[in-house]
Image (cartoon, rainbow, N blue to C red):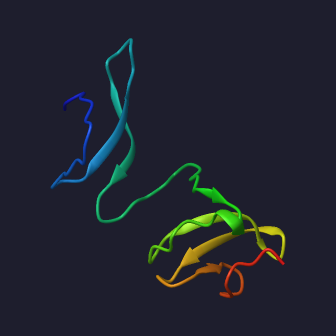
């Protein structure tokens, strides 16, 4: 297992692992795993935006829009064309 800093894109043919190492025992514990599927056992944080600062759409993207449900916060996903509200499927809007 390498401990390296990269300044450009990184590719792995066997996925990526996030681990912690106990400084006393040296025991390594896997905390996150990234491959074809991702299992999250803790809290996941996604990007936070307002309707005015929405990023370009990315099919399958997931964001938090602090005012996207008529001024209220909402989780939104992208179909590749629009950012859509997770509760109704309508486009996010500030009002």
Quadrant hosting residue 31: top left
Q: Quadrant of the C terminus?
A: bottom right
Question: Residue 6 location, x and y as percent?
Answer: 25, 35
Question: Residue 49 location, x and y as percent?
Answer: 66, 60
Quadrant hosting residue 58: bottom left
For the point 67% across and 84% down, the residue is 91
For the point 58% across and 56% down, the residue is 47
Q: Quadrant of the N terminus?
A: top left
Q: Is residue 1 or residue 75 the one in the foreground?
A: 75
For the point 70% across and 69% down, the residue is 51
The residue positioned farthest toward the left in the image shown:
13
Question: Residue 21 location, x and y as percent?
Answer: 36, 24
For the point 29% across and 59% down, the residue is 35
Give the vertical position of 71 relative to 29 (above or below). Answer: below
Give the vertical position of 23 relative to 4 (above or below). Answer: above
The residue positioned farthest toward the top in the image shown:
24
Q: How many marks?
A: 0
Give the vertical position of 7 relative to 78 (above or below). Answer: above
Give the vertical position of 17 relative to 51 (above or below). Answer: above
Question: Residue 3 location, x and y as percent?
Answer: 24, 27
Is residue 23 found left or right of 71 in the rendered image?
left
Q: Is residue 34 or residue 60 the one in the foreground?
A: 60
């Amino acid at each position: 297992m390498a401990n390296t800093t990269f300044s450009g894109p990184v590719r792995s043919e066997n996925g990526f692992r996030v681990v912690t190492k106990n400084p006393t025992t040296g025991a390594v514990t896997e905390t996150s795993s990234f491959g074809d599927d991702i299992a999250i056992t803790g809290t996941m944080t996604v990007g936070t935006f307002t309707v005015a600062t929405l990023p370009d759409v990315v099919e399958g993207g997931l964001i938090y829009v602090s005012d996207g449900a008529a001024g209220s916060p909402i989780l939104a996903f992208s179909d590749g064309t629009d950012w859509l509200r997770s509760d109704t499927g309508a486009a996010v809007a500030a009002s």
